[in-house]
Amino acid sequence: MTNKMIEVDKIYNEDALSLLKRMDDNSIDCVVTSPPYYALRKYTDNDLEIGREQTPSEYIDNLVGVFQEVYRVLKPTGTVWVNIGDSYCGTGDKGDWVDPKDNNRNGQSKNINRKIDGLKRKDLIGIPWSFAFAMRDIVGFYLRQDIIWEKQNAMPESVTDRCVKSHEYIFLLTKSEKYYFDYKAIQEPAKTFANKMVEEITSIRFGSNKYGDSDDNHFQTYSGKELKPQMKNLHRNGQTIQGMHRNRAEGGKDEMYAVRNKRDVWSVNTQPSSVEHIAMYPEKLIMPCILAGCPEGGIVYDPFMGSGTTAIAVIHSLGKRQFIGSELSSEYAKIARKRIQIEQSQLTLF
């Protein structure tokens, strides 16, 4: 069933819940999003803005309301990918909301020093897992995986009594036990032999000589059969679709690599941007979500579109996928539309 009242490849300047309620049941293939983090930034003066609640429980309750509608509109084969971060309990002293245009923070957290009943000062709140358990236990999603986003270029913090925070979570949620997941689309170069050349040797194969005929224990298995690496045409940095097409367009040769299935720790640097939106996640971070979680011709929805990165990634996925986005801030909806227009115009040049 398609959405009778909703146009695709469009950003709607309204809150997620209002748009979701106009969508048909079972009409969306994939959801990729990052909700506003709790007690961190103020994007609008609208009381419907999520993230400005007085307590974490109110924040989670509001997200539950949104994702109950997401559950309804998601196809039985659909996937949901949610990037969400954590914050700490404060002293209760007055704090200031972070200005989203403050690009000097490079995505690092700074909450408004809010005191929370039941928590001590300096306690980590546990927002991501509170969200994940609510999605599983209240909404009814399958909680399939927690993916770690490792930020190798994380900004230093002034704290001296804990480690510098350099990761966030991406949760994979599904509506059904069986769902669409194209694991081959996001395979990555294996750290093993490729074309009889050693790029980097690691112990990714197990066993010893007694388990197989090969003298090389990288190719032995418990079954006694030789395990040969699967070879695939990949970009050197992984399954980068636009990079592979660009390489061919420039006359480059296809490169074959031994591949492995993608792991659940994704090392992706934060990216500076001229767009005035500090909370942008990198396109490279969510491209695997779209390639694996949405079939070609499918629809990707982002309830909290922000400056449009999810839509840009859909455009770059080169699979004739379509997007729908909702964004409460008129300023960021305008920014997203401008970015999308630029990307779509550039595609027509090739």
Image: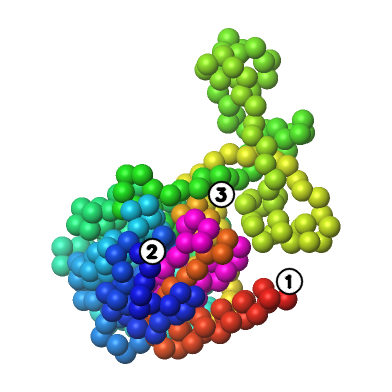
Image position of 78 with respect to 116: above or below: above
Q: Nearer the viewer, residue 22 or 65?
A: 22
Q: Nearer the viewer, residue 57 or 343?
A: 343
Image position of 186 with respect to 29: above or below: above
Q: Nearer the viewer, residue 156 or 341?
A: 341
Find the magenta span and give its range.
294-318
Which amino acid type is shown beneath numbered disc 3?
Answer: Ile
Report the disc number at residue 350: 1
- The colour scheme applied to this rendered structure is rainbow
Image-quadrant location for residue 318: bottom right
Which residue in the protein does label 3 denote? 186
Neighbour class for label 3 at 10 Å: few (<14), some, many (≥20)?
many
Image position of 152 with respect to 121: above or below: above
Image-quadrant location for residue 272: bottom right
The answer to whether residue 38 is visible is: no
Closer to the eye: label 3 or 2: 2
Neighbour class for label 1 at 10 Å: few (<14), some, many (≥20)?
few
Closer to the eye: label 1 or 3: 1
Tell me what residue is drawn at x 39 percent, y 55 percent: 79
Report the disc number at residue 28: 2
Tell me what residue is drawn at x 64 percent, y 57 percent: 241
Identify the element where label 1 is drawn: loop
